Amino acid sequence: MNKVGGIKGIRQITRRIKGSNVIMNNRDKLAQELVSLGTSDITDIMTWDDQGNVEIKASKDIKPDALRSIRKIRVLPGQGIEVELIDKVRVLQTLAKSAGLLESEKHADRPAVVEVQMLGPGDNTFKEKTDEEID
């Protein structure tokens, strides 16, 4: 069986196309969900005071966006409750990448090239080289 870009067969290609159509048709909702996840904060779910007393808000008092940002809740007998949120850094990276903020510059991986030209006395001419002349 022939593979095209790591994809085997027509069925798999059809599933990928259908999946991408679903994403394209719902991209505004997807973007809004990512923004909501990226801007949710632990203080939307719990509060604490100067003495270290922690209080988890009632579920009816937590915004739906914050509820969706909860990855896991564990009840630790005799110790309290552990709340784990989604990986916010990963969400923000996804948002930044989709907005074009993480695109690398054309020559970002190249070392900087500095050229020094020595001019003798009375030689007042200087011509700056372009990037193409340096390469």
Image (cartoon, rainbow, N blue to C red):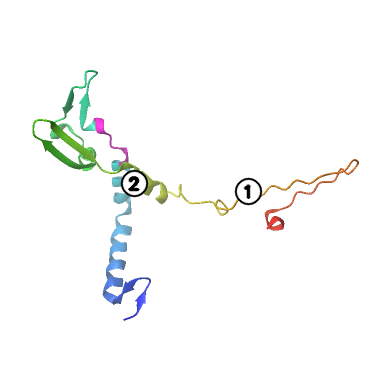
Asked if residue 42 lies in the magenta stretch, the reply is yes
Q: If the image is split into quadrants, where does the N terminus sit?
A: bottom left
SS class, disc 1: loop
Q: Residue at x 11, y 37 (%)?
A: 75
Residue 135 image point, x, y percent: 68, 58
Residue 21's label in the rendered image is: none
Region rendered in magenta: 38-43
Q: Which residue is mark 1?
A: 112
Vertical placement of residue 64 versus 1, above or below: above
CA separation, marks 2 and 1? 31 Å
Indicate the secondary structure of the residue bearing disc 2.
helix
Mark 2 Cα shell of 10 Å, populated few (<14), some (14-19), many (≥20) = few
Name the image quarter holding residue 56: top left
Residue depicted at x 79% and y 49%: 127
Q: Position of residue 13 (x, y in %)?
A: 31, 72
Determine whether, in the image, residue 115 is placed left or right of residue 12: right
Q: Is residue 16 magenta?
A: no
